[in-house]
Amino acid sequence: MALPSADEVRLAAYDLLTALNPQTNAKDALINAQQAPDNLLPGPTGIEKLILDLYNDVENYYRDYPPGARRDLCRAWGLIYDEDAHEPIPPTPPTP
């Protein structure tokens, strides 16, 4: 069996690249679309959903603690509860 000539190899490689070109273009378009920031977090609603998911994960992690301790532990992660606004503010000591 004889080896193919350089021209035959070049033509076969060209035919292969031509056949793969549409698939490569489609793959590149998909990767670009997936990496677009608008698709990762589309506007404020996407960011709010991400924050809500984080809050839910933190609360779920501390679900076995008593309510007061759970709220304190969650507060360390930045969770803000509505009842926190109604808690009395401790008085500041007078300055000497």
Image (cartoon, helix red, strand yellow):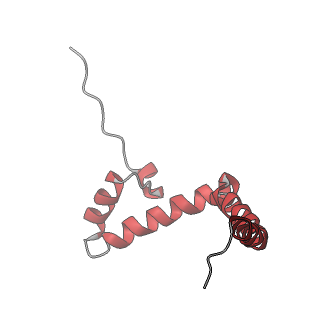
Give me the residue at 38% from left, 68% from top: 59
Residue in the foreground of this view, choosing between 57 and 25? 25
Rendered location of residue 48, percent (x, y): 59, 57
Name the quarter where the N terminus is drawn: bottom right
Q: Residue 73: name its quadrant.
A: bottom left
Q: Is residue 47 left or right of residue 43?
A: left
- Camera-side residue of 65 and 82: 65
Pinpoint residue 21: horizontal percent, then vertical percent: 76, 67
- Determine the residue positioned at 64% across, 57% down: 35
Along the horizontal axis of the image, is 79 left or right of 94?
right
Q: Is residue 42 above or below residue 4?
A: above
Please say whether residue 38 is visible from this viewpoint.
yes
Tell me: 24 left or right of 93.
right
| Left or right, 82 with reference to 2 | left
Instruction: Name the residue: 37% across, 73% down.
Output: 60
Q: Is residue 80 above or below residue 53?
A: above
Rendering coords of residue 93 (x, y %): 24, 27
